Image (cartoon, rainbow, N blue to C red):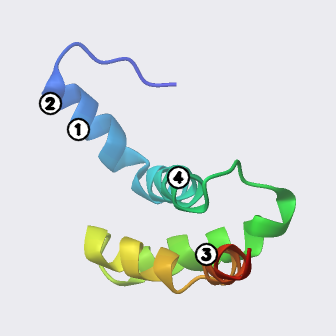
Amino acid sequence: KYEFKNIIEFKDALLAEKDRFTRAFAGHLLSFALGRGLVAADAPALDRIAAATIEKGYRMKALVREIALSKPFLQNSQKKATD
């Protein structure tokens, strides 16, 4: 648990746990993109999304791309197209 008094301390807290923050943020963004909450079956895709984002320097562009190419997102898009 981190406590902070200003934006600098907040930034430092995020940077201290940037891999964990990246995975959590990716989870929220994936949930938003899918239009539903995440389920256990989404965990492998979320792990891949977070790992690829970290590997590509924590870039937002990489995160969005990985979500758009993820199996849950593509399956969800195909399902909506056939409904």
Q: CA distance from mark 2 to mark 3?
A: 35 Å
Residue under pointer 2: 8
Quick one: label 1, few (<14), some, or many (20+) residues within 10 Å?
Answer: few
Instruction: Say what amino acid the circle numbered 4 marks.
Output: Phe
Q: CA distance from mark 2 to mark 4?
A: 28 Å
Instruction: Say what amino acid the circle numbered 3 marks.
Output: Phe
Instruction: Say what amino acid the circle numbered 1 marks.
Output: Lys
Residue under pointer 1: 11
On the rendered structure, is 34 left or right of 39? left
Quick one: label 3, few (<14), some, or many (20+) residues within 10 Å?
Answer: many
The tag on residue 73 is 3
Q: Nearer the viewer, mark 2 or mark 3?
A: 3
Choose the circle earlier in sequence order: 4 or 3.
4
Q: Nearer the viewer, mark 2 or mark 4?
A: 4
Instruction: Say what amino acid the circle numbered 2 marks.
Output: Ile
Q: Secondary structure at mark 2?
A: helix
